[in-house]
Amino acid sequence: MIKRINFWVIFAFLVPLLVAIPIFTVFLSFFDTTGNYLDLLKDTFLLKYLSNSSLILLGVLSLTFIFGVTSAYFVSFYKFPGVNFFKWALILSFAVPAYIYAYSLVAFFENYGTAFSILTFLFGEGDYNKNIPKFDGLIGTMFSISFSLFGYVYVLTRASFIFQSHNLIEVGKNLGLSSYESFFKIILPSARPAIVVGLSLVAMETLSDFGTVDFFSISTLTTAIYNAWISFDDLTTANQLSFVLLIFILLLFVLENFSRKGAKYHQNSKGNKPIPKIQLVGGRSIFATCFCSIFLPFLVSQYSYIFVFGHKTFLHFYFLNFLEKN
């Protein structure tokens, strides 16, 4: 008797296969012959593209780790002004692409920009431009991408913190560990899998970003892929350069797996006792509030630009139509 076909098994097999087809295509194209653009890259800018991509990747991973893990730690273990707001507001970083943050960052800190206008309003006329930091080039690229992507690390790390065992933290306190020592010896190591997953997503988004690096005129592997495909009409070279990006990501996974040294992580399946939050006061409370709101000025300024520009555009076309009809 023929067994009945299980369509769920077939579906579960076909979906990963469809997802893997582009990866196989990129891998197989590595053995194809290419045009002259790849040879030109090898003799000129390839090392520069690789170094820029590596520097941006390391910078973004470092910043997203600091922003995501620290903000998740604050809202998960402490009480301070605005904590209930920041639980959800920090996710808003996903709502704005990295290149929009780049526009906002430059507009805020440029000569006679938003920061200059604020200082002039508060303290009167003065030569403030020389004291206002400038975020452009590699630094601007790193911060813009980090502001947009740290939400990956924040969401996954906060979920890990919430479901961590309260017993482990209590044992640490009984052993005389301070809050600082508990964070680095118990809380952070327990959240390592979630942090690694978040950073992996950040790494893939960073290496594939084009708008931000193009805005800051930084040449990366993404720039080379774009030029190979659009400017030189060399799809094979574009696929081979894409394969290099896959190697970047694969090396990150291998290094993380090697550094783990066989360690395994488990969640308590019987449920977890809620971890009581500590009330922050004074300077610590102010620091936690300011740190969690670090990206909000650029988010608010960008939405303000969109609102003002959209309002002006609406009024412009409204009056044009009104004048044409009359």
Image: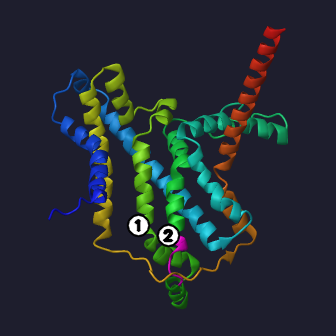
**In the rendered structure, which disc, 2 or 1, sits on the residue that comes first in sequence?**
2
Q: Residues within 10 Å of mark 1 (few under 14, many from 20)?
A: some
Q: Are marks 2 and 1 in contact (CB under 8 Å)?
A: yes
- Taking the spot 62% from the left edge, 39% from the top edge, the residue there is 105
- The amino acid beneath tag 2 is Ser
Which type of secondary structure does the marked residue at label 1 adopt? helix
On-image quarter of the C terminus = top right
Q: Please tell me whether residue 115 belongs to the stretch shown in magenta.
A: no
Which type of secondary structure does the marked residue at label 2 adopt? helix
- Taking the spot 62% from the left edge, 55% from the top edge, the residue there is 90
Provide residue 21's location: percent of width, then percent of height: 26, 43
- The amino acid beneath tag 1 is Pro
Q: Residues within 10 Å of mark 2 (few under 14, many from 20)?
A: many
Name the image quarter holding residue 31: top left
Res 135 seen here: no
Provide residue 30's location: percent of width, then percent of height: 19, 36
Q: What label does residue 193 carry, if any?
A: 1
Q: Which residue is mark 2?
A: 160
Q: Please tell me whether residue 164 belongs to the stretch shown in magenta.
A: yes
Q: Which residues are magenta?
A: 161-166
- Taking the spot 27% from the left edge, 27% from the top edge, the residue there is 235
Q: Tell whether 267 sits left or right of 308.
A: left
Above or below for 32 versus 145: above
Provide residue 56's location: percent of width, then percent of height: 43, 44
